[in-house]
Amino acid sequence: MTTTRDPITELKLRANAIRQGIIESLVAAGSGHSAGSLDMAEVFAALYFAVLRHDPKNPEWAERDRLLLSAGHICPVRYSAMAEAGYFPREELLTLRKFGTRLQGHPERTLLPGSESTSGPLGEGLAQSGGLALAAKMDRKEWRVYCVVSDAEEQCGLHWEAMLFAAKFQLDNLCCIVDRNFIQIDGSTETVMPLEPLRAKYEAFNWHAIDCDGHDFVALLAAFDEARSTKGKPTVILANTMPGKGVAFMENDFLWHGKPPNREQADEALRELRDDAARLQAVR
């Protein structure tokens, strides 16, 4: 008799595998961003394995949904999710930030099939996404645009101009996902440059706003469904996350925003993640 795990458990295992890939790539690179990459594992697992219309064997498929990572510094989570989905071999994760690699320290559109934009300067992604979403509307296409942004990125003026643009053109095929982890390289977002009340600000700009637990797959999938069914305005999902999620010694510590683990720390993190995976695999 064969048994099948429920879909949520499968997604949890995907998120765990993505986290392991993040740790492996960061320690191999010797540089990179840990906290934000780890805390978005559930969001990227949901996107690549439950939400997006995409084809790893045909990454330039014309009818694919477009996923832009505006917060390019957390690209280890996107690369790990793409490897898990079959865009390239998992072993390639170990080339992160190496000279000549396709896996640059920020996504490079012309190097990596399936990467829709080149990102680096924060604040640009939503503007690019709005342009793509308007193009889809003009061409009467059904594909959707998803844009992942950091919360501190919303300290950039261009992001707010893009919010105005998306509302003006009623881009209901656009969904912005905010990594609301409350940290940036110098500390708390609310100390450096307060963002709250963030939901009210989006709503004042005529966006549909959804708050959800960014580590709860049931909540995330419901939020993406709600975004798809919302008409006449763009949607923002404020995904409340814990920086460094899944690795106990990194959790809620802003100092891990912009640094990788050393070999000893990586081994500890991987042991913890593999133990968690074993517990999930025991679920039937």
Image (cartoon, helix red, strand yellow):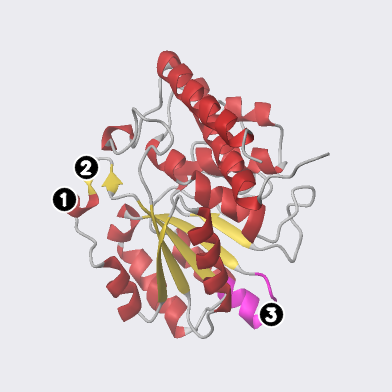
Q: Check disc 3 and give the amino acid type.
A: Asp
Residue underneath mark 1? 191
Determine the secondary structure under disc 1.
helix
Instruction: Say if 40 sits above or below 27 in the image.
Output: below
Residue drawn at the location 34% of the way across and 31% of the way down: 250
Magenta highlight on residue 55: no
Residue 187, numbered label:
2
* Alpha carbon separation for disc pair 2 and 3: 43 Å
Residue at (45, 24) in percent of width and height: 269
- Helix, strand or loop under label 3: loop
Instruction: In the rendered view, tell whether residue 17 sits above or below residue 190.
Output: above
Extreme residue in the top direction? 264
Residue placed under numbered mark 3 in the picture: 139
Q: Please, is residue 43 above or below residue 51 in the view?
A: above
125 displayed left or right of 153: right
Above-or-below relation of 154 to 133: above
- Whether residue 103 is visible, yes or no, is no
What residue occupies the far right of the structure in this picture? 1
> Residue at the spot x=58%, y=73% of the render?
228
Q: Which mark is residue 167?
A: none
Q: Closer to the camera: disc 2 or disc 3? A: 2
Name which residue type carries label 1. Answer: Thr
Of mark 2 and mark 3, the one earlier in the sequence is 3
Relative horizontal placement of residue 92, taking residue 128 as reference (left or right) = right
Q: Quadrant of residue 82?
A: top right
Q: Quadrant of the C terminus?
A: top right
